[in-house]
Image (spheres, rainbow, N blue to C red):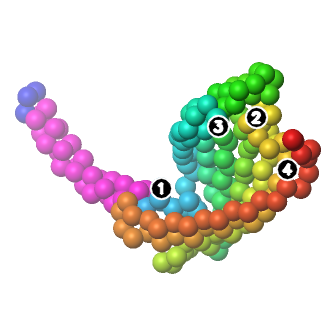
Amino acid sequence: MRIALIAALLLGGALGGRPARAADEGATELAKKTQNPVADLISVPLQSNFNFNTGIKDETVYVLNVQPVIPIKLNHEWNLITRTIVPVINQPSLFPGPNSISGSAWGLGDINPSLFLSPAKSGAIIWGVGPTFTLPTATDWRLGSGKFSLGPTAVALTIQGPGWSAPSSTTSGRSQAGVTRT
């Protein structure tokens, strides 16, 4: 019985060691994909921002950006990558005055979806272009613009090795509708 158990453990260890190298190679590929904003990989990055010394009261505004990225294969040459930024905001009162004007707010900000058309197979430079939108979805008027906006967006980057990328992105939105707040 002991011999069978030892043989099973040794055999399991020998067989289990083979996929470890493949797992390491897979982990390297996964690490590269996580650095690439237009990779063929579903991800949900969370970006945590603290904006210190905001307003006359020098308060700290906290913004958690939930940013799901979903690739859609259009054909063997092109992918459509969707990236949506959903801000969850905690904004204390920033200015003195009545609570109806200067009060604190907590909730969702304006949601910003972007679409990137990107080659399915990329070279040294990875890129994507498409439209971006700002949807007036804020749960409190203090947390958003109250306007629908749209414009172009683009991203380009190169990955220099495990853990090293050189990204560049640009977005431009122009208000299309909504009431101007004063």
Residue 60 rendering spot, x and y as whole percentages: 56, 33
The reply to whether the magenta stretch includes residue 173 is: no
Report helix, strand or loop for mark 2. helix
Three-letter amino acid code at the position of disc 3: Gly
List the residue tagged with mark 2. 142
Three-letter amino acid code at the position of disc 1: Thr
Whole-number angstrom distance, CA of label 3 to CA of label 1: 36 Å
Tag of residue 146:
none
Residue 63 rendering spot, x and y as whole percentages: 60, 38
Q: Residue at x 72, y 49 (%)?
A: 112
Q: Nearer the viewer, residue 76 or 155?
A: 155
What is the quadrant of residue 58 in the picture?
A: top right
- The boundaries of the magenta stretch are 4-31
Tag of residue 34:
1
Three-letter amino acid code at the position of disc 2: Arg
What is the quadrant of residue 142 in the picture?
A: top right
Tag of residue 148:
4
Q: Nearer the viewer, residue 105 or 168?
A: 105
Residue 168 rendering spot, x and y as whole percentages: 56, 67
- View extreme (left): residue: 3
Q: Residue at x 73, y 36 (%)?
A: 143
Please report whichever mark, 4 or 1, sits nearer to the chain's N-terminal start: 1
Q: Nearer the viewer, mark 4 or mark 1?
A: 4
Q: Nearer the viewer, mark 3 or mark 1?
A: 3
State the count of labels. 4
Please report whichever mark, 4 or 2, sits nearer to the chain's N-terminal start: 2
Can the viewer see residue 76?
Answer: no
* Horizontal side, residue 140 vs residue 59: left or right: right
Please report whichever mark, 3 or 1, sits nearer to the chain's N-terminal start: 1
In the displayed structure, would residue 162 be above or below residue 46?
below
Whole-number angstrom distance, CA of label 3 to CA of label 2: 13 Å
